[in-house]
Amino acid sequence: MVAPLKLGIAGLGTVGAEVVRVIARQQKTLAQRCGRGIEVTAVTARSKAKKRGLDLKGVVWAKSPLALANDPNVDCFVELMGGADEPALSAIEAALRAGKSVVTANKALIAKHGTKLAELAERQGAALNFEAAVCAAIPVIKTLREGLAGTDVNRIYGILNGTCNYILTRMEQEGLSFEACLKDAQRLGYAEANPSFDVDGHDTAQKLSILASLAFGTKVAEGAVSVEGISSITPEDLNAAQDLGYRVKLLGVAVRTKTGIEQRVHPTMVPRSSSIAQVMGVTNAVTVDGEGFSPITLVGPGAGAAATAASVVADIADAARGLRALPFGRPVAKLGTTKKAPMERHEGGYYIRLLARDLPGTAATIAARLAEQGISIESIVQRHPDGSREVGTGKKSVPVPVILITYATTEDAVRRALAAVQRDKVISGRPQVIRIEKN
Amino acid sequence: MVAPLKLGIAGLGTVGAEVVRVIARQQKTLAQRCGRGIEVTAVTARSKAKKRGLDLKGVVWAKSPLALANDPNVDCFVELMGGADEPALSAIEAALRAGKSVVTANKALIAKHGTKLAELAERQGAALNFEAAVCAAIPVIKTLREGLAGTDVNRIYGILNGTCNYILTRMEQEGLSFEACLKDAQRLGYAEANPSFDVDGHDTAQKLSILASLAFGTKVAEGAVSVEGISSITPEDLNAAQDLGYRVKLLGVAVRTKTGIEQRVHPTMVPRSSSIAQVMGVTNAVTVDGEGFSPITLVGPGAGAAATAASVVADIADAARGLRALPFGRPVAKLGTTKKAPMERHEGGYYIRLLARDLPGTAATIAARLAEQGISIESIVQRHPDGSREVGTGKKSVPVPVILITYATTEDAVRRALAAVQRDKVISGRPQVIRIEKN
């Protein structure tokens, strides 16, 4: 029997504590699967005194993450502290430099330093596993890195943030405002006191940048992601989406275009019949469009201690078995670069909601401005509060919502058309624009 | 640079030919991913003369699969011939005995001989990869073997046969009969001239037996699967399912019970809101219920040359990189055994459709017979052709469909209750019984 794999775990929050429990509970099965035991040898965390209900008898308490990474009794460094930079970064670097396997659930760190760390891991022949960094228990990293090793990916997109999907689901199902749902999500612990990282799309952007790197063989480039959050979405948009056969989701989308990899995070209209549209509440989902066959969608829990720990332990088991693919599937020297694709060049269909002033000729004006930019309209719907469906008849003095769905066009054309419509003073307020993603 | 991995491919049907094409097209990427080249060195197929449009210049044509497996110039034997037994079996055994990696897409062979072959692979330290044997491009084998290495699986279920799902989808959407949809499926090439293997559930059973082995750490036991097909399903059942918030799918289900692993294939009522209910047409899906977190569902193409070749090539890439987990995730000596769980002990909810004779007291008689067996009724619906909803009023002499949904009970109780109802002569024909699977 091979010697056991000795783990050093940095971070004993909910995930770290759960990893310690799973390793203990699954001791026998893991030893069978890996052909060797897996032991927690040393740990570290901010507070040693904190009650965690863990049996850490015989486990060394390291004085710092760096000391833990350098402990000669540790074969595999498990980083569960979080934080994009120190102290996690130096500790991971130290472990890799010593040729140790590293397992981390830290998306912020991988999004920021992933390429650099992968290069070090590659040079040292060490594993750098981060399945838990994206979508917790959903094996999306392994699927991209290994399961689709022979497939050209054309597009990858997903619901990568449970908080946003929970809010959008409740807004749709109960007709509530964004603000009301956010408050509820905070009360239930699904959203942070400062919700910006989630609801403004940054969490999704970090995860997307990691997935895009694996899917397209490019260096992780969080800064190349165009990001919009969900705070401007209204129940009216969700209702209109329903009427038109769509549902609104905050998607992270990375797609191969003629000019490079376009990475974007924004509220998106997806066809109600698509797999991704069925994903409700805090659940996550990722769809991969591979060349030559219909898409693969992976659905599951994207957060939570048990779901995250499951992926951490699977990564540890891979390290114990000596399964070791390159961190991003290819040598870092072969990874391409991505620059930020300007959103104005984005091509696709658009949902546009305007509040039209109820004046004669309004519909004609709007249609003309779109036509000037070469935009074809797939459907146009407006509803007077009295239920009639014509605009510009002067029957009411209140603004009337007009909803347009365009055929594929460029974002630039949409922006110019809407600027012209605003100059014409036939609408009130700012137009709402939501991109459409077809499956 | 490590020496290239030299492939011997046995079988050049649609999948084999596509694998040759993908290996050529992805040559550069695969070499980057694996740190070594991958070359097709030798092939064999039934007809050498057949035009396949492949560039096989410099590739040796072996005189038999066995000769190919034994060719000292072959490092990795790729079996794409199909067939549960010879000549595939002996050739795979010869390759493993020589310590060569084996990649196969052959579900029938793995279902029948998987345990024996895994034992040989394990003894020889050779890879035996069969991702393409179940659900083509969906990485379900890798997910169970590696991605959930630290997770206890409680249940795994899925839509594993595209033909059946295509037929059920069309029956539901167009109100057509089973026979009409089967004919269409045959015309479109989705069903074989002899459709029994698909529509009677045997294809699903083979795939399920492989998944159950990986999920529960048991020896593959195709004979332990209880199997029922979809030929008895009527448009009336699909309509009733819709009314009741369900959809009918042919599921393969393997579940941990107090007495062991229950493996079964049968038409199943699944809640319309579940991920699995959204899977339409030829698409496949597998849901894994892991202990401690909400289910993971993998959706995608379960058949087709490109989708199958994608998994074959990924398995080849794993072999080239030296990624090698035990074929069923654990040593064969540690795999448990499963005996066939008697379906009469199955516990769950039931959908029952009866054609009740329109006599006074019929509803009371049926309800009493169920009550005698301790079965609680969640809902009961019957519709006179004239739209009234009462039975036993004597208004009509034609039989009236009565649909019952029970709370969880045992199959044995349901069978006894229905036998009693039949003896009471208050129904016409045989009752339709469909098991319910909650998510």
Image (cartoon, coloured by chain):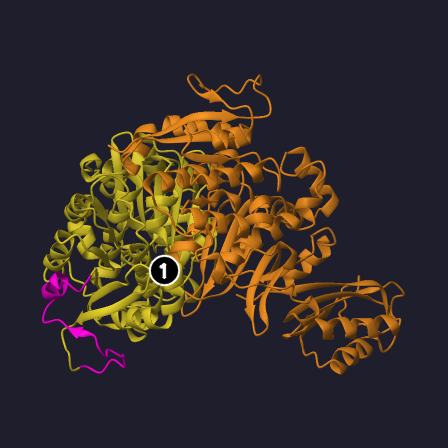
Chain colours: A orange, B yellow
- Residue drawn where x is 21% and y is 77% of the image: B58
Query: Looking at the image, which is closer to me, A312 or B14?
Result: A312
Q: Looking at the image, is A92 positioned above or below residue B136?
A: above
Crowd class of label 1 (few under 14; some 14 to 19; many from 20; radius 10 Å): many
Residue B358 appears in the figure:
no
- Residue drawn where x is 45% and y is 63% of the image: A295
A150 with respect to B117 (left or right): right
Q: Secondary structure at mark 1?
A: loop
User: Residue A173 at what x, y percent from top left?
Assistant: 63, 48
User: Residue A124 at what x, y percent from top left?
Assistant: 43, 46
User: Residue B43 at what x, y percent from top left?
Assistant: 18, 70
Residue A172 appears in the figure:
yes
Query: Looking at the image, which is closer to me, B164 or B376?
Result: B164
Query: Looking at the image, which is closer to me, A355 or A93?
Result: A93
User: Residue B366 at what x, y percent from top left?
Assistant: 33, 39
A309 with respect to A353 (left or right): left
Query: How many numbered marks appear?
Result: 1
Q: Chain of mark 1?
A: B
What is the three-letter code of the residue carrying label 1?
Ala
Q: Quadrant of the N terminus of chain A?
A: top left
Q: Quadrant of residue A127?
A: top left
Task: Indicate whether residue B139 is drawn in magenta.
Answer: no
Find disc 1 in the rendering and name its residue: B137
- Residue drawn where x is 23% and y is 59% of the image: B104
Magenta span: chief secondary structure: loop
Highlighted range, magenta: B50-74
